[in-house]
Image (cartoon, rainbow, N blue to C red):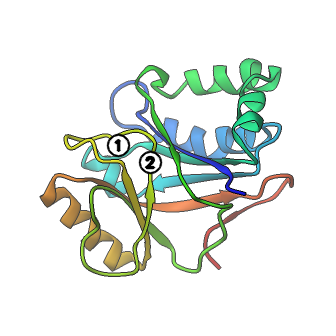
Amino acid sequence: MSMQHRIFLVAPLGEAPHGPQRRHWEQRHGPLFAGLPGLRGYRQNRPLDREWERGRGWFCSETWFDDRSSEAASFATAFYRERVTPDEASFLDRDAAWQAVVLGEELPQPHPAPWRVLWFGDSPPDGPAWHGAELTRPAPGPDGVRRLYAAWFDTESAALAVTRAARQGVVAFACRPHLFVVGSTSTREDQP
């Protein structure tokens, strides 16, 4: 049975610098959101500083629920309406948020590589083992593609992949994923 996996890209409120919003997202919002009833998995894909500096930083998160009805029930709870929504409105541009269901994805697992590149395009560049997935909505960007590719990298390779993306006009960014272990009070990085 396939889970309900969704990815979100949301811009911060206001003008740069975005340091306070980023700290809030990582330190306060992440643990708060991870308490959402019925949530099975939650990953923050935290863009590298250089991504924010070049205007390609987004709050990018992924959620996993058992199925669509579990997701809908979770977002209908008082906890989401009264705690999560007001918190999001304090630092996110919710009106401009983009989201799509990622088809065929199961619960995330920790990964030993420190960096991840997310690439929204018809095909990824040459290089490592890219994992592709179909999206239910066109991705942001001029081409309206419905594909997401992800790959894990060391630091140098991640920077190279993002440089290629910028040259090709593809929406892509390097991030350091943080996987929240749902159903527990602990969290851990997607690295050893």
As helix, strand or loop, the secondary structure at mark 2 comes to: loop
Q: What residue do we see at 81% from left, 58% from top?
A: 186
Q: Position of residue 38 (x, y in %)?
A: 81, 41
In this rendered view, identify the residue nearer to me: 31 or 96: 96
**Label 2: how many Cα within 10 Å (few below 14, some 14–19, many 20+):** many
Horizontal side of 27 relative to 90 (left or right) equals right
Q: Which mark is residue 87?
A: none
Horizontal side of 92 relative to 165 (left or right) equals right
Image-quadrant location for residue 155:
bottom left
Mark 2 — residue? 135
> Residue lying farthest left?
167
Type of amino acid at the residue the image marks with label 2:
Leu
Horizontal side of 16 relative to 65 (left or right) equals left
Type of amino acid at the residue the image marks with label 1:
Ala
Q: Position of residue 7 (x, y in %)?
A: 52, 45
Mark 1 — residue? 139
**Label 1: how many Cα within 10 Å (few below 14, some 14–19, many 20+):** many
Marks 1 and 2 close (CB-CB < 8 Å): yes
Relative to 92, residue 37 above or below: below
Q: What residue do we see at 73% from left, 19% from top?
A: 81
Q: Position of residue 53 (x, y in %)?
A: 29, 49
> Residue lying farthest front?
1
Image-quadrant location for residue 179:
bottom right
In this rendered view, identify the residue nearer to me: 137 or 95: 137
Q: Position of residue 131 (x, y in %)?
A: 45, 70
Relative to 97, residue 126 above or below: below
Q: For marks 1 and 2, give the CA distance.
A: 8 Å
In this rendered view, identify the residue nearer to me: 183 or 155: 183
